[in-house]
Amino acid sequence: MYLAGTNTRRVKRALFGLFKGAVSKDVVSRAWRKVEIDWDAWCARDLARKDIVRLILDGTVIKTRLDRNATNISVLAAIGVRRDGQKVLLSIKNMGGESTAAWSQFLTDLDARGLRRPEFAIVEGAPGLEAALISLWGDALPIQRCTVHKHRNLLAHAPIDDPVWVPTVFSKNRDRLLTTDMSRKVMATILAHREVAPLLLDEHFSVDGTLVRAWASMKVRPAQGGRQATGER
């Protein structure tokens, strides 16, 4: 309601149904002060006990009304992923933009509240954000580009009617990639990754590793009925 540019009169209307009757300005003021106190406490809460292993960082623009004027607010947000997979909203603040300085101040606040260095960070691709991350936790921190932002940028700059999606062009580019050493190097790196390697067994294929290894090796393997089948279709 606050971001929508609410005022006391609108809050009174919203609370009318909640309290099943009219409320006074004093009640509205007390309710707002309680919300403000709770919000400040949430923004300053300790994060040291949060077992955060992945950190998702993003910025967005929210349209709102301030002093009866329409305006845009740049909001930065941090979502942590715990070791058990549960997502936790860690912080959301209006920092006035997405510059390196804004992100640095935002991340410094998280660090001061006890957030430990995550195993890796997922970002939207803004250069200011990556620079702030490196400044705080060093360039050894793995940083991954958000695939959702990648897809949006791809569709924005290469719409569905773009020549790159023409079947013949797509097939040629795919074949060019698969027949070069680059694809083998990429797959070798994937197979050697610490999280992928345990999925690949010499005796048999695990469920998760079957397609990865079959495509990577491209070896001839026996098929049912005595015929030979390859990894290619």
Image (cartoon, rainbow, N blue to C red):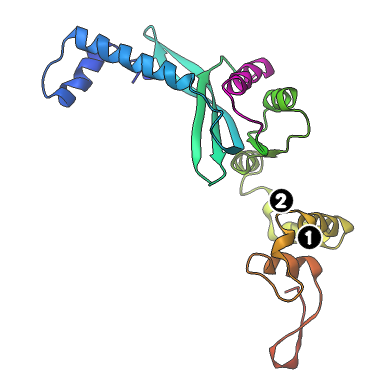
Cα–Cα span, label 2 and label 1: 10 Å
Residue identified by numbered label 2: 164
Pointer 1 local density, CA inside 10 Å: few below 14, some 14–19, many at least 20:
few
Q: In this view, does 123 lie to the left or right of 216?
A: left
Q: Is residue 110 magenta?
A: yes
At x 76%, y 74%, the residue is 231
x, y percentage for residue 133? 70, 27
At x 73%, y 24%, the residue is 131
x, y percentage for residue 49? 54, 32
Q: Is residue 172 above or below residue 119?
A: below
Q: Is residue 213 left or right of residue 10?
A: right
Q: What element carries label 2?
A: helix
Indicate which disc residue 128 carries: none
At x 63%, y 19%, the residue is 108
Location of the N terminus (image quadrant): top left
x, y percentage for residue 87? 50, 40
Q: In this view, does 68 lie above or below 140?
A: above
Q: What residue type is labelled 1?
A: Lys
Q: Residue furthest left?
A: 21
Q: Residue furthest bottom?
A: 225
Span of residues in magenta: 98-117
Q: Is residue 49 magenta?
A: no
Q: Is mark 1 on a helix, strand or loop?
A: helix
The one of 163 and 172 positioned closer to us in this rendering: 172
Location of the C terminus (image quadrant): bottom right
Q: Which amino acid does label 2 sit on?
A: Val
Pointer 2 local density, CA inside 10 Å: few below 14, some 14–19, many at least 20:
few
At x 69%, y 56%, the residue is 166
Residue identified by numbered label 1: 172
Q: Which of marks 2 and 1 is nearer the N terminus?
A: 2
Q: Residue furthest right?
A: 181
